[in-house]
């Protein structure tokens, strides 16, 4: 039986967050009652992340575990998960437990019931973020700049909770930190993107792998690159000429 939905979750040193998150994902998938799998990607963690994931496979038969031999970052982890996923549809979640798996059915319904063949992605919108004020303001500024320059009409491109077609993702150009620009890249490919408000939880365990200065520096460089990609792209509409037939 073919898999309908794959949940891709990148992890790096999130040992305390893994078990409750996987449990919530599994509960959500059971309620959805569709063929599904969970694809966890351990990005060369230095804590017990990989061992915990391996052990959880005994409890969750639909859990697949992929492991990076060296740390490659969140975007590469997402790419690894999507490339190895078996589902037609992909949902991504951050591994820190701040995204709520219970929101996945809402994104799924928004995509499936849209009656719009051009709609290729539904992006989560963390309207009420549970982060520090510095992180919230940094994200708000970054989203405002990205939205103005890329015109992607997406209020929260940094939200890890997204749902999209696997085929669409595999056509996108790959580069480090691409996960922050997925809506713009999907639109560059000719697809449409909508945003759906989602729940955001405070981080209970561990600490963020980024700070505002790191995000700002790499964000400026990556933003320039994405602008270049968009300007250098041309989405052709192809019409095949039918062979004339003699009467």
Image (cartoon, grey):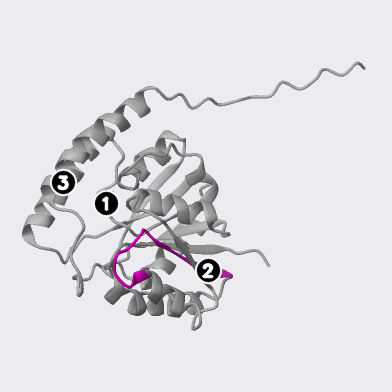
Residue pushed farthest right? 247
Mark 1 lies on residue:
158
In the displayed structure, does residue 233 sit left or right of residue 220?
Answer: right
User: Label 3, label 1: how many angstroms apart (C-alpha)?
Assistant: 14 Å
- Nearer to us: label 2 or label 1: 2
Q: Where is residue 9 drawn, in percent x and y? A: 39, 63
- Answer with mark 3 or mark 2, whichever residue precedes in sequence: 2
- Answer with mark 2 or mark 1, whichever residue precedes in sequence: 2
Callout 3: helix, strand or loop?
A: helix
Note whether 36 is above or below 157 in the view shown.
below
Callout 1: helix, strand or loop?
A: loop
Q: Nearer the viewer, residue 215 or 140?
A: 215
Residue shown at 34% from the left, 48% from the top: 179
User: Label 3, label 2: how many angstroms apart (C-alpha)?
Assistant: 33 Å
In the displayed structure, does residue 104 sit left or right of residue 210?
Answer: right
Mark 3 lies on residue:
214
- Nearer to us: label 3 or label 1: 3
Q: Where is residue 20 drawn, in percent x and y? A: 33, 79
Q: How many marks?
A: 3
Note whether 235 is above or below 107 in the view shown.
above
Q: Which mark is residue 137?
A: none
Q: Which mark is residue 37?
A: 2
Q: Which residues are magenta?
A: 35-49
Asked whether 46 falls inside the magenta stretch, the response is: yes
In the displayed structure, does residue 165 sit left or right of residue 22?
Answer: right
Residue shown at 65% from the left, 63% from the top: 2
Which quadrant is the N terminus positioned in? bottom right
């Amino acid at each position: 039986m073919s898999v309908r939905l794959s949940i891709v979750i990148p992890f790096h040193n999130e040992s305390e967050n893994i078990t409750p998150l996987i449990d919530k994902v599994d509960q959500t998938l059971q309620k959805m009652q569709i063929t599904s799998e969970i694809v966890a990607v351990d990005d060369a963690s230095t804590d017990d992340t990989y061992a915990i994931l391996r052990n959880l496979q005994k409890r969750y038969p639909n859990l697949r575990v992929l492991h990076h031999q060296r740390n490659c970052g969140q975007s590469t982890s997402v790419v690894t998960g999507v490339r190895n996923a078996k589902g037609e549809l992909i949902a991504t979640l951050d591994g820190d437990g701040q995204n709520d798996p219970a929101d996945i059915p809402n994104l799924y319904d928004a995509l499936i019931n849209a009656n719009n063949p051009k709609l290729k992605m539904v992006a989560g919108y963390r309207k009420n973020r549970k982060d520090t004020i510095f992180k919230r303001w940094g994200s708000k500024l970054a989203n405002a700049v990205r939205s103005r320059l890329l015109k992607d009409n997406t209020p929260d491109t940094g939200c890890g909770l997204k749902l999209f077609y696997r085929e669409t993702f595999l056509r996108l150009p790959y580069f480090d930190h691409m996960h922050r620009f997925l809506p713009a890249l999907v639109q560059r490919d000719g697809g449409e993107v909508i945003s759906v408000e989602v729940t955001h939880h405070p981080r209970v365990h561990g600490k963020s792998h980024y700070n505002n200065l790191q995000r700002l520096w790499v964000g400026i460089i990556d933003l320039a690159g994405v602008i270049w990609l968009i300007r250098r792209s041309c989405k052709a509409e192809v019409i095949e000429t039918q062979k004339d037939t003699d009467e």
